[in-house]
Amino acid sequence: MSSSTEGSTRAQRLGFAAGQVVQEFGYDDDAAADLRTDLEETVEVELVGEDYDDVTDGALIWHRADDDDLSDVLMDALGGLDDNGPVWVLTPKAGRPGHVPPSDVEDAATTCGMHVMSTFAVADDWSATRLSSRGRGK
């Protein structure tokens, strides 16, 4: 069980801050409820769903082996994303039901013009992988 200090640190490690709009994709009953609560406390509003059609500051994608194509979900997430907003793909850890090999996340990211920045354990059953847009000309 994590303390609220650990929770807020974990949410802040994802790069989100108060006042940001975070769009969530792939939410289901197996999502880490404590992480979602931590994120909502950090941004001070509820996470918005897949049907949200305004600009967002970041995206949180829960993805399992049997879910829809990750590339398609990433494209949906990028559609409303403000420049340089964090995109996180959360996948079940190795040995957990629905585990997604890191190479699958990397392949989907590459298909969408992104690359993997970092991966770490974010909850008991979930790993978080940060994706970033490839450098654009300024």
Image (cartoon, grey):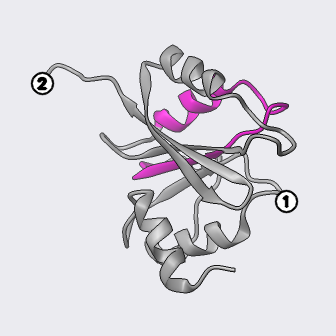
Q: Earlier in the sequence, mark 1 or mark 2?
A: 1
Label 1 – label 2 distance at C-alpha? 42 Å
Question: In the picture shown, does residue 83 fall above or below 73?
Answer: below
The residue labelled by disc 1 is 29
> Residue drawn 72% across and 63% down?
32
Counting from the top left corner in percent of width and height, residue 59 is at 51, 48
Q: Secondary structure under badge 1?
A: loop
Mark 2, other Cα within 10 Å: few <14 / some 14–19 / many ≥20: few
Question: In the picture shown, does residue 92 fall above or below 69?
Answer: below
**Residue at the far front in the pictured view:** 95
Q: Quadrant of the C terminus?
A: top left
Place residue 104 in its image quadrant: top right
The residue labelled by disc 2 is 138
Q: Is residue 131 left or right of residue 137?
A: right
Q: Which segment is the magenta one?
A: 54-79
> Residue drawn 39% across and 52% down?
57
Q: Which residue type carries mark 1?
A: Asp
Residue 69 in the magenta stretch? The answer is yes
> Residue drawn 69% across and 80% down?
1
Place residue 68 in its image quadrant: top right
Mark 1, other Cα within 10 Å: few <14 / some 14–19 / many ≥20: few
